[in-house]
Amino acid sequence: MSMKGTTDIHPDAVLESLLAKGGRSDRRAKLEKLHEVCRKQHAAGSRDFSLPTIGRMGEAANIMKTGRSLYNAEAADYRTLIEAWAAYAGPSAPKPPKMKASHEYLMKIEDPALRSIMQSVIAERDKLKMQINMLKAVTEKIVDRRPLGAKISTTPGSKPMAVLEMSAQLPPYERESLMKAISCEYLERNGLYEGERGEILNEKGRKIFEVGFTRAIRRVLGENPVDPADPAQVKRKMPKE
């Protein structure tokens, strides 16, 4: 079984096997002293047998000049002995999670109803903090506040301006009404026709709407003015003789 896992093998047995390898008396003495240091650490109820911890203790006991020498290749037997004690003691107990200050504050509130209210308030606060942090992470925000249908107009020496065309200000039903009012079908059905200068005339040639009426409506609608004199564009109904 690996020395790094939990085991029932007592480190005394591991020490005996390491001493049986022979070698210099100085090495054997240091192994025994280090073994005693680990025994005291275990007797104190500690399960910390990390190399930095045991290295500091071995340095304090004059077993080695510096605890960093445990990382050298020549210190393999020392590390084996330390790992035996670590496996015998078992893994270190997990540290209890650090309690948030807000949770400690809640635990001091004896009234369960009030504690529940405060808990929901703190949860809402934490949620808002998270949203604010997300917004802070966005370095650039582009907000288009132009009205729908607006176009950017630029002139030399001035800043670009949003221009809202007349047609964009009309709701669909108003546009439809204006387009219908000047359509050839509607005019003919009501005995009217469009004159050459954009006026509306009746069957007798009398002016119903003044010159430029249809052209003005088409401009409002954003359409190209129709030339009433062009038969391909407008089907005219001439007045009766």
Image: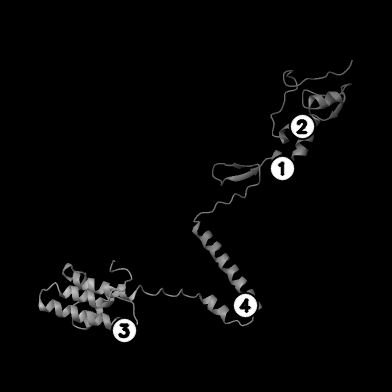
Number of numbered markers: 4
Q: Residue at x 55, y 51 (%)?
A: 142
Residue 73 - label = none
Q: Quadrant of residue 131?
A: bottom right
Mark 1: give few (<14), some (14-19) or many (20+) Cα within 10 Å: some
* Residue at numbered disc 2: 179
Q: Position of residue 164 (x, y in %)?
A: 66, 43
Mark 3: give few (<14), some (14-19) or many (20+) Cα within 10 Å: few
Q: CA distance from mark 2 to mark 4?
A: 67 Å
Q: Is residue 121 above or below residue 143?
A: below
Q: Nearer the viewer, residue 80 or 124?
A: 80
From the image, state whether disc 1 or disc 4 is nearer to you: 4
Considering the numbered disc 3 on the image, is that residue within a helix, a strand or a loop?
A: helix
* Residue at numbered disc 1: 169
Q: Amino acid at mark 3?
A: Ala
Q: Position of residue 73 (x, y in %)?
A: 17, 67
3 or 2: tag closer to the N-terminus: 3
3 or 4: tag closer to the N-terminus: 3
Evaluate if marks 1 and 4 touch, with contact meaning CB atoms under 8 Å apart: no
Whether residue 64 is visible:
no
Residue 43 - label = 3
2 or 4: tag closer to the N-terminus: 4
* Residue at numbered disc 4: 115
From the image, state whether disc 2 or disc 4 is nearer to you: 4
Q: Quadrant of the C terminus?
A: top right
3 or 1: tag closer to the N-terminus: 3
Q: Quadrant of residue 225?
A: top right
Q: Amino acid at mark 1?
A: Gln
Q: Residue at x 82, y 27 (%)?
A: 186
From the image, state whether disc 3 or disc 4 is nearer to you: 3
Q: Position of residue 50 (x, y in %)?
A: 29, 73
Q: Amino acid at mark 2?
A: Met
